[in-house]
Image (cartoon, coloured by chain):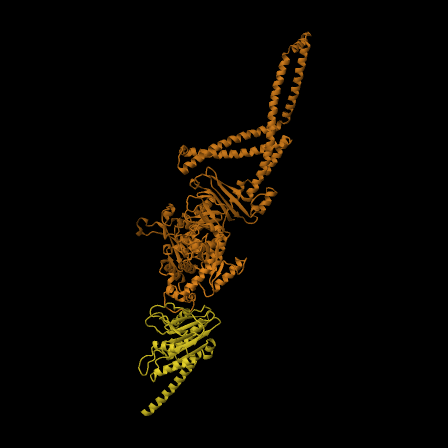
Amino acid sequence: MRLRAFRIENFRSIVDTGIQTISPDNITCLIGQNESGKTSILEALEVFSSGVISEDVLRSDLSLPRVTCSFEVPKNYLEDKLRSVNNDFDKLVKSLNQITLVRSWKADLKSQIDIGGELLEYIEGLNKKRKKELNDTKKKIEKFYSELKERRGKKKALSAELNEIQVKLDEHPARRSILKLFRRRKANVKDDDENTISELTESFEKIRSQLEVINSFLEEKGSLIKAIEDWLKTVNALDSINKRLDEISARLEERHQTMTLLTGPSIADLSRGEWEKVLNEYKSAINEKEKLEKDYELKILLCGFIFDDLSEEKARRKLQEIEKERSLEYQSKELGEILYADCPHFEIFEDFGSLLPNRIDMEDLISDNQSVEGYKAARNFLILADLDYTFFQQPSSRILKQKIENLNAKLTLDFQDFWQQYVGRHNKIRINFELDHYSTTHGEKAGKPYLEFWVKDEGERLYPKQRSRGVRWFLSFYLELMAASKKEKRQLILLVDEPGVSLHARAQEDVLKVFEDIKDDMQVIYTTHSPHLVDINKLHRILAVQRDDVANHRSTTVILDAARLGDASPDTLSPLQSIMGNPVGNQEFSADKYNIIVNNVGTFYMMNAIMKLTGYKGKIHFIPSTDASSIPLMCNILMGWGMKFAVLLFYNEKEMEIARQLEKMMFTDQPGKNENIIIMPEEFVNAEDLLSTLDFKNLVLKTRQGITISNSEHVNINDLPRNFLLSKFLGEVKNGNVTRDDLDEESKENLVLLVNILQRFK
Amino acid sequence: MNKEKKDFDSVLFAQAMDEHLSSLRYASMIQRSLMPDTSFLSGILKDHFIFYLPKDYVSGDFYYAYQNAGYTVIAAGDCTGHGVPGALLSILGISFLNEILQSRDIPRANRILNRMREKVMGALDQRGQDYEQKDSIDIALCVYESYRSVIQFAGANRPLIMVSDGEMKEVKPDKMPIGIAPFEEVSFTNHRIEVKEGDRFYMFSDGYPDQFSEETNKKFKIKNFRQLIDYVSGWSMDRQKAHIESIFYDWKGRTVQVDDVLVMGFEI
């Protein structure tokens, strides 16, 4: 699986990075100022794997972090991995080549992995549909229940009325007479009394008949009513569990506030045991809630089926069938956990400062004495060699030595396989270690075992410390990387914070080569300030990290991808500017001026000197390319950033070819006529030709040698340090040592010509 | 024996001299062929004369003419020294001028001289060091732009004398040669002179004014040369040449010619 995109929310200075696509060629470079949030991004990705966060990553509003990662999956992976659920799900799974996983944290700082992306949409869609059906059923049931209540009320009222009539009838004199008559056969009942009795009897019958209807309804709907009453119990239970959860959450939040803001209400004083109890209560409440929610849903369904005239038995059978079907379905958490198990693991490498020592005492290794020099590198070495301390307890010194020799050969082969192109002369570096014992001259240590390391190169046996820091750094990097991959059985995504920060520029470039070398096996995301660790031809690898308000270090972190680099601040882009050759610290791409791209730094100096000499006030801004061949790339960048730009080309073969390329590539609307390509007249082969030979000699070269060719040709043929000379010239112009009056009329005329050409950008 | 040896040596010497002289004569022919002939000059100028008198077979003085659609270039040069070294330098000068004028630069008299100086300094590897050769060329160069009725003039130690409506003016040159300057090379000055038909111009080497007189053993001097030009400028070019030539020979008499002589006059 390959990481393709990530999104980080609520993590330290990050509120929401939005979805950030990482480089498709597996190397992604985060550039940005200090405190821009680069390391936070690496940390957030790392906790996506570990799930472990501390309170200090929480933002002040205590919103909980969420890290989303999308991974590209191999063909058929999902089909093989997931069980068949139903046609829709299976079809969706077959169509996917990417999965999205979301790790989110809860108030107790515990996290869970859920599925995201299309699979989540499917699950949510299904849930939404079911929820709607449930709601419809719930409404029907509620309506029914309200009618039921009404009928029950009516029944109650009717029963009371019936009782009342019964009492009246029982107590009526006529009724009594009749009764007496029945008993005593005495007929003295009056007519009106008879009428009243008749009316009461009629009412009695009427009410009784109404009651019978209600009773019959209640009897008929008995199963439904029972089901509804059962559901209502669950509703009440859910209400009470939600209240309980609210209370516990408030306590947890109070604790977070105590921990993060150091404003301390009494909750912080809870003992560890009490606090554990609170957390357990929270967990059990969550579990109970989940169970009740499931119950709630099933009970509504049951009510719905009975409502739709299924017998209770049939309804329950149908429910069982649904339950069975649904038991096959994945919920986001389950799906997340299943797929997460196969995801690459983020491993952060912050520091390779622990360089392989010359020797380390076995005692220090066994006692885990991390303070001893080179401990980590030595420990990594042992992990890599698959050694634990029992290995050295081998009683036979001959066998031990043989084993060590075999291991040395294996390690060296592995190392050479990994670093064969980049370390040492002729790829012959060998790493060796040996177990030895201190001699009697070592006082207290006498007789104690130690491990000794050395690096062999073409027969030379050198201790690590005798090798360059670069080689030692590589060795440590290798050891740490390999040890990590050995410990971690899953595929790794390497997160490297400021790699090779102390290395020489060349060695830094080698680090980049190392990344290139491993990128097919291991994705790399690294942060850097160094231009040597950015490949200018692979801008798609760059994500610029900066604060939303660059002047405010408390503002939130934003990430700008290659297409939006133009919005990044000059400081953020400083590594890029350095690569592209912009030599002057305060010179950067300008959003409100015309950026005029010139072939290289020397020309950049010359142009700035000319602008100073002529006092040109136009809104133009020269940008040096590394050389003419990089001009199209610069154009692409500036075009992508939506900046105004033009290209100033001198009349030489290379730049004329560039002009043709640019017309084909970028300015296709008006071939040959585009004003954004300025081609200097043919006598100007390069910028220095803008000065007369005499001025070039006197003011730039400071020589009296006769120059019989153009200035630029003279520079090339004699291999003169052009950038240095023109930079010096710019310096002298800036200092006022060279002014316009020092130029001869030929130079002045050339400068006027250039200024006239540039007028169009004024 | 000695006498025989002497005779033999003198024969050998005479033979060597003869070979040498014939080489020089041939070199002289080559040099002359590098300079524009009268018919070419007559084609590009309304009228002209050239008084060219090398001290030896070959000369350090040279004259030059070039024309294309837009402009005409006339120059009179004087290389340091005379004889073979001067002649070689003059040939370099001519070829440099050809090279420069065949580039597509806008013709500016001073730029032509600036470029020529670079070439001469480059060819002689002059870098301002004490030990190096200080050879150079003095030159007066005019670029005539007929469509603008303008003559541009730039001079390296050689002036331009102009006579217009009977009035003579001298355009001063820059006091530096085509070659390493004593202190620092600066750009030559471009003089822009508006001209009209009938204006006459004179360029010359220092051979004429520097010539010593047989009678007085004094130099002819520039002051007298100016007066001479002023005196003859109204005449036809042929007559001017004849007069200037005759004055020179009269002045020199039987004394040695001290340097190559070049006087060039033309009318536009």
Colour in which chain A is drawn:
orange
Closest to the observer, A555 or A118: A555
Residue A417 visible here: no
Q: Is residue B15 visible?
A: yes
Q: Is A82 or A365 nearer to us in this picture?
A: A82
**Which of the 4 image quadrants contains residue A40?**
top left
Q: Residue at x 49, y 71 (%)?
A: B69
Above or below: residue A492 compared with residue A127: below
**In the picture shown, does residue A322 fall above or below A587?**
above
Q: Quadrant of residue B171?
A: bottom left
Q: How many marks?
A: 0
At which x and y percent is residue A707? 40, 69
Q: Is residue A632 above or below residue A216?
A: below
- Image colour for chain B is yellow
Q: Along the horizontal axis of the image, is A562 left or right of A125?
A: left
Return the x and y of residue B159 as percentages of the image width and height: 38, 73
Q: Relative to A204, does residue B4 appear above or below in the rendering?
A: below
Task: Classify residue A730 by image quadrant.
Answer: bottom left
Which of these two is toward me, A593 or A623? A593
